[in-house]
Amino acid sequence: MTQLHALVVYVPETHIEEVLQAIGDAGAGRIGDYSHCFYTTLGIGRFTPLPGAQPFVGEVGIEEQVPETRVECVVEKDMLDAVELALRAAHPYEEPAFMTWPVNGWR
């Protein structure tokens, strides 16, 4: 049996399809006989790039607001590293905001 983890990531709307495809292809969102299973909600990401940052959107020292999509899905523990690599490769941000944690599910 494989431990499941939850994955939550925030993606600018301009790149949502690319990121969903990449992380799904890497193994995120597999439930039974289904793949690429995600729950998404729209929101506004807020951040201020600090000195040394090379932001995809905005300028250093100026608060930015960007339409983003929150993506939630499950990932088998042994696929977490591959999913993170795919996420970082497809996501446009220098430092993508994401988190994972074990959930009460086994496969």
Image (tube, rainbow, N blue to C red):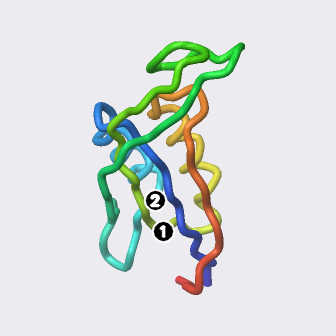
Secondary structure under the numbered disc 1 in the rendered image: strand
Task: Give the residue type at disc 2.
Answer: Ala
Camera-side residue of 26 and 13: 13
Residue 98, horizontal then vertical, whole percent: 57, 50
Residue visible at 59% across and 14% down? 60
Which residue is disc 1 drawn over?
A: 74
Give, as a three-letter code, the residue at label 1.
Val
- Looking at the image, which residue is at 53% across and 61% down? 7
Q: Quadrant of residue 40?
A: bottom left
Q: Residue furthest front?
A: 62
Write down the residue under mark 2. 28
| Residue at the (30%, 51%) spot, across then down | 42
Residue 55 vs residue 73, the one in the foreground: 55
Q: Is residue 101 left or right of residue 33?
A: right
Relative to the observer, which residue lies in front, 25 or 19? 19
Residue 32 placement: quadrant: bottom left
Q: CA distance from mark 2 to mark 1?
A: 6 Å
Q: x, y percentage for residue 53?
A: 65, 17
Q: Is residue 21 above or below residue 61?
A: below
The residue under the point 45% across, 46% down is 10
Secondary element at image label 2: loop
